Image (spheres, grey):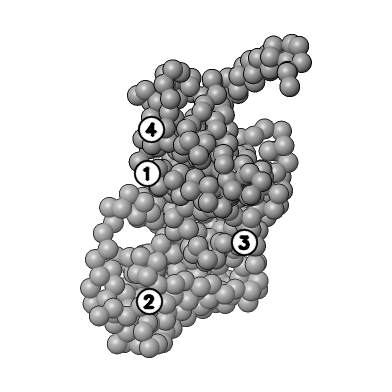
């Protein structure tokens, strides 16, 4: 039977189109005859494998082209296909020229009427570009995984939708105190990692506008410790889901330093403000006794011949009182200045507190006598401890002077004490005018002026009480004040017994 006219031409055209299609698709086809053991290739396959079109290719020659590591699986699958008519698909490598290329074969068997395999047909696809792309991707992923794992900064990948932790490097686990098992399938909110949980919701909203952010945030470790970090975030796609790559840089120490600096600056500003007001008070109070002395001296100098003996005595008493006040003020100011400079050395030695108190009473008895105030030293004779003598003199002198100032004529001031297990307790109590609760709060604050005058209109700066507090604290002791208006005041000092 003859072929229809033009059939050969149509077949040639079809073969041409098939070859062109295979060429464009980087693929070829082949047929292996089980009977003749010949391998027939399509035109594009000669190009893909870069072999001579005139040469015939045996199965042995084909296997010789394949990478040694892939030969075994090719042979095994090919034999099963011939023996059992089992179709298969396999990927393998071929050395084409000097370049290694990747191919994929889709193979099936053809049988005769007896069910015996007579031919094996295959389609070969050049998958080099795909495999190289996959390799590039895998290399990039492996490189990213290595960098992520070895990153010295705490790093994690969390799911954007719910904060589920997908990956966390060792540094992140170390910083936050968790194990791999604890973070597996847990969310950042479940682990209480955010110091302020609402921050995450606000963050997700921001990430809708931009895919990467840098900001400062507070986090919480497993033990509850707060941890501050510069947070770098970038939205990435992982297995089809939007995730956050998080890298943290510890700034806890910096934040603590900033907060400490801020607190120190505020404290310094407060101290400077207090000192400014304090020196204003000191300047005013220095002028007061000086003006009294100058006024009395002026009268004595210009009108002494016209003054009676009593008037001269009154002026002399005024000069004496003003000079005493000025001396106490300057003495306290000098001691305070030395204390601030650190030039007042703490030199503890065995001190008898009864004797120190007696010295202070002797020094101030004239002031007390002028107001008819009785001073009583009830401290035990054997009240001895290691302390700085000069500081204790200043403590007793200022406590007694303050008590005399605010005790009315005819009143009394009592020094008493008792021995505790590890400290000595000393109390200076008067039955004077007392203080309000507000005044007690401001008592030891530099720069608050005492507006209450003494019972003989004595003025004061409050510096003596500030000195008392600083000297007591220098001994690692405590100072307490109890006072009621109209009922008097008691200052109680606890001084530790030193070995």
Of discs 3 and 4, which sits in the foreground? Answer: 4
Q: Which residue is mark 1?
A: 69
Of discs 1 and 2, which sits in the foreground? Answer: 1
Q: Position of residue 415 (x, y in %)?
A: 44, 80
Q: Which residue is mark 3?
A: 186
Quadrant location, the C terminus = bottom left
Query: What crowding class fits label 2: few (fewer than 14 Cα within 10 Å), some (14-19), or many (20 or more)?
Result: many
Q: Which residue is mark 4?
A: 61
- SS of the residue under disc 4: helix
Of discs 1 and 4, which sits in the foreground? Answer: 4
The answer for how far apart the CA atoms under marks 3 and 4 are is: 57 Å
Q: Closest to the observer: 95 or 51?
A: 51
What label does residue 495 carry, if any?
A: 2
Q: Position of residue 309 (x, y in %)?
A: 45, 55
- SS of the residue under disc 1: helix
* Residue ID at (41%, 43%): 70
């Amino acid at each position: 039977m003859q072929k229809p006219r033009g059939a050969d031409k149509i077949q040639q055209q079809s073969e041409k189109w098939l070859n062109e299609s295979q060429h464009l698709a980087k693929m070829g086809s082949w047929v292996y005859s089980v009977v003749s053991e010949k391998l027939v290739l399509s035109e594009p396959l000669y190009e893909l494998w870069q072999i001579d079109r005139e040469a015939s290719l045996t199965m042995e020659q084909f296997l010789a082209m394949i990478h040694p590591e892939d030969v075994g699986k090719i042979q095994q699958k090919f034999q099963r296909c011939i023996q059992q008519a089992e179709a298969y698909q396999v990927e393998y490598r071929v050395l084409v020229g000097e370049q290694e290329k990747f191919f994929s074969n889709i193979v099936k068997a053809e049988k005769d009427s007896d069910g015996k395999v007579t031919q094996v047909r295959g389609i070969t696809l050049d998958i080099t570009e795909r495999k190289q792309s996959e390799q590039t991707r895998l290399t990039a992923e492996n490189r990213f995984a290595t960098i992520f794992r070895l990153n010295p900064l705490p790093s994690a990948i969390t799911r954007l939708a719910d904060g589920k932790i997908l990956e966390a490097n060792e540094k992140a686990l170390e910083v936050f105190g968790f194990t791999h098992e604890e973070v597996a399938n847990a969310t950042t909110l479940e682990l209480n990692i955010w110091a302020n949980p609402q921050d995450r919701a606000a963050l997700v909203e921001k990430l809708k506008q931009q895919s990467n952010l840098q900001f400062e945030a507070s986090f919480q470790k497993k033990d509850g410790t707060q941890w501050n970090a510069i947070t770098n975030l970038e939205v990435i796609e992982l297995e089809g889901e939007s995730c956050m790559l998080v890298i943290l840089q510890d700034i806890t120490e910096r934040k603590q330093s900033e907060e400490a600096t801020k607190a120190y600056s505020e404290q310094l500003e407060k101290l400077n403000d207090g000192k400014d007001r304090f020196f204003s008070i000191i300047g005013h109070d220095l002028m007061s006794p000086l003006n009294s002395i100058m006024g009395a001296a002026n009268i004595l100098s210009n009108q002494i011949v016209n003054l009676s003996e009593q008037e001269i005595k009154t002026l002399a008493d005024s000069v004496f009182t003003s000079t005493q006040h000025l001396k106490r003020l300057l003495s306290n100011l000098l001691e305070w200045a030395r204390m601030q400079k650190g030039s007042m050395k703490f030199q503890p030695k065995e001190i008898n507190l009864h004797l120190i108190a007696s010295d202070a009473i002797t020094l101030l008895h004239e002031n007390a006598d002028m107001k008819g105030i009785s001073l009583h030293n009830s401290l035990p004779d054997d009240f001895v401890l290691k302390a700085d003598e000069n500081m204790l003199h200043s403590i007793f002198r200022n406590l007694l002077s303050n008590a005399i100032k605010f005790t009315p004529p005819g009143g009394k001031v009592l020094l008493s004490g008792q021995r505790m297990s590890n400290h000595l307790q000393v109390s200076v109590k008067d039955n004077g005018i007392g203080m309000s609760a507000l005044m007690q709060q401001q008592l030891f604050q530099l720069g608050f002026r005492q507006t209450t005058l003494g019972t003989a209109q004595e003025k004061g700066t409050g510096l003596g009480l500030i000195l008392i507090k600083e000297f007591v604290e220098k001994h690692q002791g405590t100072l307490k004040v109890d006072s009621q208006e109209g009922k008097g005041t008691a200052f109680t000092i606890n001084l530790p017994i030193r070995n």
